[in-house]
Amino acid sequence: MAENRGFEPPMNDTFMELRSDREIVIARTFRGPARIVFDVYTRADLVKRWWAPKSLGARMLDCQADVRPGGTYRYLIRAGGGEEYAFSGRYTEVTPYSRLVYTQVFEPMADAGEVIVTATFDEFDGNTRFVSRELYPSKEARDATIASGMEKGMRETMNQLDELVVSLKGGAE
Amino acid sequence: MQAFAILEPNRFRIVELLRSGARPVNDIAKRLKLNQPQVSKHLLVLKKARLVEVKPHAQQRFYALRAEPFRELHEWLEKYRHLWDARFEGMDKLIEEELEKKQEEKPHGRK
């Protein structure tokens, strides 16, 4: 365990891949055991401190989470522009420290349907690989949900087509 | 977000090929070793998604990429990545805090 040095991508790189027009895969490695990463990801008092990043001007007004099969959660957020909205849903599978399946509804667009999120936590050498698969009911729902998490005016510099094709290559193969 | 039409592998290959310039259907088919009706079908999808446009040239129809939707898709992806980056950084801090707490609880523990 001490001298095991294989290929290591940078620890804190956020991996993002489009698997279909309704699915997004997000992955990240954390320095800590799965038990802690799972807690930070699910426990309401901890979620309250990271879900709505201050650096993006957002704030979490309320956070409730009953993390057990059939339990529900609700995250109430105030975006940088002042508008309030909530994400809520129900846990359908809770395997402590390794796997979580839950639905997610963006309440302002509740009739657009539910996102099904499957999150896995794999521990290795004291680190944890987190992978989240988000399956959206439609393209429109996905776009709206994502747009809602952003502060208005946070537009990045337009990038060139070259970069796009590079970033999409992984997803198309 | 119509730009997701690109994610079908052959459509992706067509888009990659068109990056080097506009081409007619038969040329695309030949270069990618696909049959022409297949390519026409993909081009129709890409055209409907407004990813490509048709430019008449010397009695032939040339297919060319439109830049705008690609920028839109890329921008959208980067924004979402940015959001998750910020969230994960927040999680990093909390994980560190929790690890420290654990160490305080077990003063003789090695990890």
Image (cartoon, coloured by chain):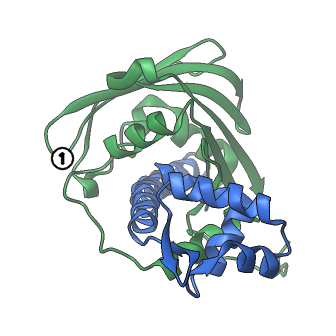
Q: Quadrant of residue A49?
A: top left
Check the image and name the residue furthest to the top.
A70
Letter of the blue chain: B
Q: How many labels does the image show?
A: 1
The percent position of residue B82, horizontal first and vertical second, equals: 40, 61
Callout 1 crowding tier (Cα within 10 Å): few <14, some 14–19, many ≥20: some
**Chain A takes which shade in the image?**
green
Amino acid type of the residue tagged 1 in the rendering: Gly
Q: Is residue A65 left or right of residue A53?
A: right
The percent position of residue B100, horizontal first and vertical second, equals: 51, 55
Q: In which quarter of the image is residue B28?
A: bottom right
Q: Mark 1 points at which residue?
A: A80
Observer-nearest residue: B103 or A29?
A: A29
Q: Which quadrant holds the C terminus of chain A?
A: bottom right
What residue is at 71 percent from the left and 31 percent from the top? A96
Observer-nearest residue: A25 or B3?
A: B3
Observer-nearest residue: A151 or B37?
A: B37
Residue A131 in sight: yes
Residue at disc 1, secondary structure: loop
Q: In this view, does A45 lie to the left or right of A152?
A: right
What residue is at 13 percent from the left and 38 percent from the top? A82
Q: Which quadrant holds the N terminus of chain A?
A: bottom right
* Residue A82 position (above or below residue B68): above
* Residue A46 position (above or below residue A114): below
What residue is at 50 percent from the left and 69 percent from the top? B54
Residue A63 in sight: no
What residue is at 63 percent from the left and 45 percent from the top? A132
The percent position of residue A114, horizontal first and vertical second, equals: 53, 24
- Return the chain for callout 1: A
Check the image and name the residue furthest to the left.
A82
The percent position of residue A3, horizontal first and vertical second, equals: 84, 82
